[in-house]
Amino acid sequence: MLAECFEINDLRFHSLIFENVFIEKLWTGARWTEGPCYVPAGRYVLFSDIPNDRVLRFDEVSGAITLFADRCGFQNGRTLDRQGRIVSCEHGGRRVSRIEHDGSTSELCATFDGKKLNSPNDVVVKSDGSIWFTDPTYGIDSDYEGHAAKSEIGASYVYRIDPQNGKTAAVAMDFAKPNGLAFNGDESSLYISDTGLSHDPDGPHHIRVFDLSADGKSLQSKGEVFATCNAGVFDGFRFDRDGNIWASAGDGVHCYAPDGCLLGKILIPEAVSNVEFGGPKRNRLYICATQSLYSVYLRTNGANPTVSSDAH
Ligand code: MG
């Protein structure tokens, strides 16, 4: 079974996986799944089915899949903020929005420099409450994952929304198609994937790593390449507690050590778009892969718990 489920590239990978577990296919029936977000208080996972403009909910207790929302702005990536509110990227709405505790939806950012955003793709919240998101063009390139339109900004940037004044600043402007992003455990670095290969056969298909400035509000370094994908592109990714990256790729989930070494892969028969640690112990990796949702238990736990009781 091990040979079917995992590819071992480095012996360290053995300490992160169970050799007797199954990769569970929990559900299929989407057109393109994305944006997995585990909500610990409810023990469910929200995930997007972007072309069908709906959000689905996997109930971890009952195993049921139900509709959470539809005609909701062709949502893509999402996360919880430090108060447990759901922050979402909307292709169709061309904005980042948040579901408040009372159920209403607030718009956090829809423009930069007076111009409409392209189509926010993925989002992460830092412990200081700032919201960082990527804005490639996938949601305006066609009517399939949003509404076809020309880019007003004319480029694809990475942004930060300030928690105090709500203002949005561009923090990285040299990406082809910025996509997934995550902070490492102590938030000293931000990792961002570039999926420019989708539009250019010579385009980037890697993750870059940036040092944060001393005040934690901007990116200091040039963003050297951390890892290059050897099967398609890296879309979304998450860190575990030991600083390993679990990154989506064309043939499954690739696990990289903090030193950039590819430790191994979880092999999935559909292209993977994003992953999320869930379960009460955060040791269950949920995997959005094209039409389906999968999960696998790991011998590690997710880093960066997003609720305030665990914030540092
Ligand atoms: Mg993405």
Image (cartoon, rainbow, N blue to C red):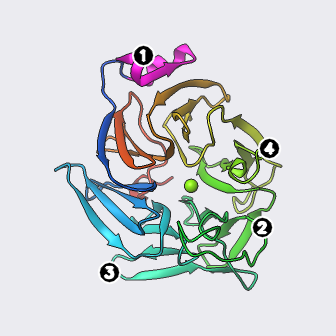
| Amino acid at pointer 4 | Asp
Q: At 67% from the left edge and 79% from the top edge, which residue is drawn? A: 167
From this viewpoint, which residue is outermost toward the bottom?
114
Q: Would the CB of label 3 be found within 8 Å of ligand 1?
A: no
- Can residue 152 be found in the magenta stretch? no
Q: Which residue is mark 4?
A: 202
Instruction: Measuring from the top left, give residue 244's x and y in whole percent.
Output: 55, 33
Q: Which residue is mark 3?
A: 102
Q: What span is in magenta? A: 1-17
Q: Which residue is mark 2?
A: 155
From this viewpoint, which residue is outermost toward the left?
62
Return the residue nearer the eye: 156 or 102.
156
Proximity of marks 1 and 3: CB atoms separated by less than 8 Å: no
* Vertical comparison of 40 with 50: above or below: above
| Element on which disc 3 rests | loop
| Amino acid at pointer 1 | Ala
Instruction: Measuring from the top left, give residue 216's x and y in whole percent.
Output: 69, 58
Q: Which residue is mark 1?
A: 3
Question: In this rendering, would 93 be left or right of 101?
Answer: right
Q: CA distance from mark 1 to mark 3?
A: 48 Å
Q: At 72% from the left edge and 60% from the top edge, which residue is drawn? A: 215
